[in-house]
Amino acid sequence: MRKFYLLTMVGVFFAGLWMLTACGGQGEEEKSKTSVTAEEVQKQTKEAVKAMTTYAEQEKEKYQEEVRETLDAYQEKIEEMTERAEAATDEMRADLEHKIQEMQKKKEVAAKKYDELKTAGDQAWDDVKSGMDSALDDLDDAYGTARSRFEEEKEDVHEK
């Protein structure tokens, strides 16, 4: 997102610069015929920057909301698995509880990244977002491992 923002800013800057230089060599008569003035270009550039900034903020807020919802959903899954582990056989319960603890640790790491994400400035946003994505991937992997173990437990119970 930051790269898009920077590229757009550079594009707007060069478009404004081009307009200014295109009008710079004209005589007074020709300038009066030109419908674009330097002030108008500056105004439009400021409006474009403001629009891009607003868009970037909206995207950040949208992403943060999605992350919050994802973390809440994983917390529900952890609680659900904890309840299911209590019903497992003794020999499986220890392994399932271990998998749940791993998942909880990954969720805590992701929650810390989320806190960093909320306070990250524009300069650090891409790095923090990348770390957030990685933490969510790790959490998803831990969930998949735990869910697989629960499926094995379910199969073992049905076989007996």
Image: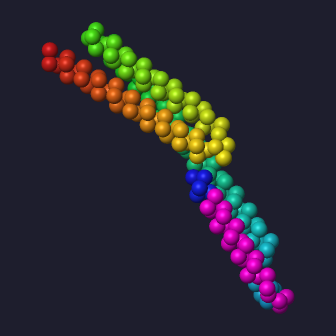
Name the residue furthest right.
28
Q: Quadrant location of the C terminus?
A: top left
The residue closer to the viewer here, 155 or 51, is 155
Residue beneath the point at 65% across and 40% down: 120
Residue beneath the point at 60% across and 49% down: 58
Is 152 on the left-hand or right-hand side of 104? Answer: left
Q: Where residue 41 sits in the image (x, y, percent)?
A: 75, 71
Placement of 158 over or under 132, stated as above or below: above
The colour scheme of the drawn protein is rainbow
In magenta stretch: residue 22 = yes
Q: Where residue 83 sits in the image (x, y, percent)?
A: 36, 16
The range drawn in magenta is 6-29
Q: How many marks?
A: 0
The residue closer to the viewer here, 109 or 39, is 109
Res 15 → quadrant? bottom right
Q: Chief secondary structure of the magenta span?
A: helix
Placement of 3 over or under 147, stated as above or below: below
Residue beneath the point at 62% across and 37% down: 118
Q: Where residue 57 sits in the image (x, y, percent)?
A: 63, 48
Placement of 10 over or under 81, stated as above or below: below
Q: Where residue 70 sits in the image (x, y, percent)?
A: 47, 35
